[in-house]
Amino acid sequence: MLSQDLELKQALAKRGITRRQLVKFCSGVLATLALPERYLAQTVAAVGKARKPVLVWLQFQDCTGCSESMLRSSHPDVADVVLDLLSWEYHEVIMAGAGGHATAILDRVVKEEKGKYLVVVEGAIPTGDDGVYCTIGGHSAMEIAETVCRNAAATIAVGACAFDGGLVRSNPNPTGALGVHEAVPGIKVINMSGCPHNAANTAAVLVHYLTFNDLPALDQYNRPLFAYGRIIHDQCERRAHYDAGRFVTEWGDEGHRKGWCLYKMGCKGPVGTFNCPIVQWNDHTSWPVRAGHGCIACAAPRFWDHMSPFYERVPNVPGFGVEVTAGEIGVGLVGATIAGVTAHGLIKMIKPVPKPEPAAETTPQQGREN
Amino acid sequence: MARLVVDPVNRIEGHLRIEAQLEGGKISDAWSSGTMFRGIEMILQGRDPREAWIWAQRICGVCTMVHAIASVRAVENALQIEVPDNAHIVRNLIAGSQMVQDHVIHFYHLHALDWVDVAAALKADPAKTSQIAQSISDYEKSSTTYFRGIQQRVKGVVDSGQLSLFASGYWGHPAYKLPPEVNLLAVAHYLEALAWQKDFIRIHAALGGKNPHPQTFLVGGMTTAMDPNEPAAVINPDTITFLRDLAKSARKFVDQVYIPDVLAIAPLYSDWFSRGEGLGNFLCYGDYGSSGANDPSSFLFPRGIVMNHDISKVLPVDPGKITEAVDHSWYEYSGGNGNGKHPSVGETNPKYTGPKPPFEQLDVDKKYSWLKSPRYDGKPMEVGPLARMVVGYAAGQPEIRAAVNGALKALNAQPAVLFSTLGRIAARALETQIMAKHLEDWVDELDNNLSHGKTAIFNPVRWDPSTWPDHAAGYGWHEAPRGSLGHWVEISGRSIKNYQAVVPSTWNAGPRDGQGQRGAYEASLLNTPVADPDRPLEILRTIHSFDPCIACAVHVLDANGRRFTLPNVR
C-alpha cells in the first residue's frame, strides 16, 4: 500500500499535480456518478496512473456544439480532463497540428494503442453516395469511423447526431446520415444523447471507465442509466405547479413570470428522459425549463422528427407520478410514437396511452428511414 | 511542383481543406474547399416557422445562437412583428456575450498556437515572465510563483511523453519568433482563458438555459420573463446582479489579459502586418442597435461597404445585390451556372462531381467545394471583425475610431496595416473590447426597465398562426462573431416553404466564381512565404486569422420546394 502511494505520488509529481488536487477532482466525479465515497481510493489510483489512457475525438457531420460543451466542463475542469486525466491526442477543433501531422497521430493511435484507446464521436455519419458528404484528409467519415471505432476499446457517441443521426438524419435525411452504432455496427458503444451532450455526464463516464475499466450500467439505447434513467417531468422544479394545475398559457403572462408549468406551451418534459433538471448546465447554473422555455426532449431517440412541432402540446399525458420510471412512460410513449410515424410533425399523432407498454417491447428503429 | 494540401485544417469549426501551389517558396495560388454537407435548410421545409430557430441554431455550435437570432428576425420580418425593448436588450446581451467569449476562445485556443511555441515556454525564466506580465497589465496573476507553476504543469505533460493536444504541433518551426518568456506568458493565459470562458458563458445559462445552444428565443420576443418581485421569474433583481458580475468579469479579462497580450505579441511578428491582405472589399450588415434590429442609424457596428481599401468612403448596402454562384461548388442551377442567384430566389441541387474518396487531390479547375460563392454586386467581399472595424472606422463611428487609433498609436502603425493577417487579429480584439464595455450598459438598461416595472418581453399578436397571411417572406440579419449573417425565409400555408442562410464563412471561405474571382481565403494566401512545405504554419496563420466556421458555411435549399435528387459520384 505504502509503495503504491509512493508510486502515485511520483506519478503525480511528474505530471505537476498534487495528490490533494487529485482527490478533490475524483470526489467531484463520484458525486456526478452517484457513486459512494468508498470508491474514492480506487478512483484516485486509476486516475493517477503514470501512463494516461489515450483518447481521440472524431468530428463528422457536426456543429462542434458537443466539443464546445466539453470545453464547458467544470467538474472536472476541462484542462484537467484534456491534459491530466487522459492523453487527448486527436481533436480537430483544439489540437495543435493540422493536415498530415495530425492524421499521422490518429494512424499511430489506431496501430499502437489498438484495443486500448477510447474514441469519442461527434456528429452523424453520412452513408449516402459513398460518403462524399463528409471527407477528412480525402477519406470518408464512414471509412475513418470504421477504422478508428472498430479498433478502440470503446466508442463514446456524444450528442444527438452521433447517437442516432440527430438533426442531420431528420426527414428527408438528404445525406443518408446515421448514428455511430448503426454506421459501425457491432462495436462497443455508449451513447451520450442530447443536443448537445452534457459534459458533466460525459466526464463522469470517462472517469468511470478509467476507474473500473468498464462502462456504467446502460439502458436499451446504450445510454448510461445515471443520466438517462428518469423522466424530466418527474425531476422538474416546476412539477408542483403541474400537479396543482397552474400552467403558463401565454409567453410572458403571470404564470410565466411566476415559474409555472410549461406543459401547455409544448414542453416535452413528460416524454423525455435526462438528468438535465438535476445536473443542469454550465456549472449547475440553469437549464432550459428554468429559463422559461419548454423542454424539447433533446436526449430522446430521433427527437427532431418525433418531438416536433416543439410548440404543440403533448396530448393526453396521464397523471403519472414520480413512481413511474422512464422505461414505463418516457420510452413507452416515445416508442409508440416511433412505431407509427412516417413524417415529421408527429406528436399530434400520438394516441392516448391508457396503460403504457413496458420498455422492453420497444427498440430503436435502426437504419429505417421515414 | 506538387500541390500542398492541408486537410484537416485544425483549430477551426468544421471541415476545411486548403490546397496551395508553391513557387519559389511562396504561394502562387490557393483553393479553399468545404468538405462536409448536411442539408439543414432542406430539412427545415414544411416545418413551423416559429421553431425554425431551434433547428437553424444547430447550423453551428461554436457560434451558437447566431443562427437563432437571425432566424427569429427573419420570421419576425416576414410576419411584421415588433419585438419589445426588453427582448432586444436580452438578445444584445446574449449575442454580445457570445461575441466576447467566442473571440477570446479564438485567440487563445484556436489561433495562439500558430504564434506561440509551447515547448519553448519550458526554457523561460518565470521571474522574467513575471516582469513582462507586470509591465503590460494589472492582472493579478503575474507572480514568479504563478508562472513557475504553469511551467511545471507544462513540463509534467512534456516529460510524461504524452503530449495530448500538443502532440501534433509544429514546435521548433523557424517561424516561431517569441522569446521563451512571452511563450510562457501566452501558455499561462491559454489555461486562464480556458477557465474563464466556461465561467463567463454562464451568462448564456442565465438568459438561455444553457450553452451551447441556448433555448429562450421566441418569434416575437424571449422566454426570459421579467418580474422585480418574483424570485421564480427568469429575470429578477438577483439575475441582474449575476449578469452584472459576469459582464464585469468580461471587461476585466479583455482589458487586462486579451488586449495586452495582443499588443505585446503583435510587434514581435510585424512582418504579418503586410501579409494575408486578401480582397480589400469589406461588407458589414451592422447590428447591436440601441433600438432594435430595424434601425441601422442606432447600430453599434455601422452598416456599410468599403471597396478596394478605400476608407475615404462608405457605400450603402443594397440587399438586392447579394447573390450566390455555384460555378465551382458541388451544386447545379437549373438555368446553368454562370449567373448568381439572390438568396430569396436561390436554388440548390447538390451534385457531387469531385473524386470518389479516398482521394489525394481535388480537381480545382472544376467544382471543388460544398460552399457556394456569395458575391455583392458581383464582387467577392470579406466579412467579419476586420470588415466591422474598417467600415466603422470609415463611417466615423467614434468608439471604433478611438479604439483603432489607440491601437495604431500603441503599435506605431498606419491604418494600412489593418489590411493583413495581424490586422484581422487586432480588429477582433478591439471589437471584443468595445463589446465587453457595452455588456454592462445593456445590463443597466435591463435593470432600469425592471425596476420601473417595464417588464414586457414578448409580443403575442402573431403567435397564433391563424393570424398570419397565407404567404409571407422576410429576412433577418445579424453581425455574428465571424461576420455578416443573413437568413431568408418564405412562409406559405403557415409552414416554411423556403429557407436560405448566407453565412459569414461562406463569404470568406467560398471558392472562385465563374469569372475566376477568388474568395477571401484564397486571395489572402497569395504571395505568402512557406518556409517548410511539410509544416505549413504560415497557411494556418492567415486562414485562422479569419476564424473559419465551415459547418455554418455549407447549406442548401431548393427554392422551388422540390426534393433534390441525391448526386451520383462520377
Image (cartoon, coloured by chain):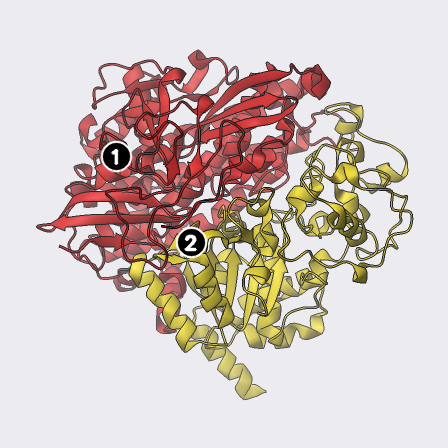
Chain colours: A yellow, B red
- Nearer the viewer's eye, disc 2 or disc 1? 1
Side of B458 relative to B280 (left or right)? right
Q: Can see residue B251? A: no
Which of the chains bears the disc numbered 2? B
- Identify the disc placed on residue B3: none
Residue B406 vs residue B138, the one in the foreground? B406
Task: Measuring from the top left, give residue B494's x and y in whole percent.
Answer: 66, 23
Q: In which quarter of the image is the N terminus of chain A?
A: bottom right
Query: Alpha carbon of mark 2 to alpha carbon of mark 1: how far?
Result: 25 Å
Up/down of A113 relative to A224, above or below: below
Q: How crowded is mark 2: few (under 14 residues within 10 Å), some or many (20 or more)?
A: some
Disc 1 target residue: B423
Is residue B141 among what the camera can see? yes
Residue A349 in which image quadrant: top right
The location of residue B114, given as percent across then percent down, is 28, 51
The percent position of residue A278, horizontal first and vertical second, equals: 72, 51
Q: Name the residue under label 2.
A: B191
Disc 1 crowd rating (10 Å Cα; few below 14, some 14-19, many 20+) is: many
Secondary structure found at label 2: helix
Q: Is residue B332 above or below residue B142?
A: above
Residue at point 89%, 43% (across, down): A318
Residue lying at 53% horizontally and 24% vertically, measured from the top left: B489
Q: Position of residue A31 (x, y in %)?
A: 68, 62
Q: Which of B415 and B245 is in front in this view?
A: B415
Q: Element type at marker 1? A: helix
Chain of the residue under label 1: B
Disc 2 marks which amino acid? Leu
Give the residue type at disc 1. Gly
Residue displayed at 18% across by 43% down: B29
Q: Are marks 2 and 1 on the same chain?
A: yes
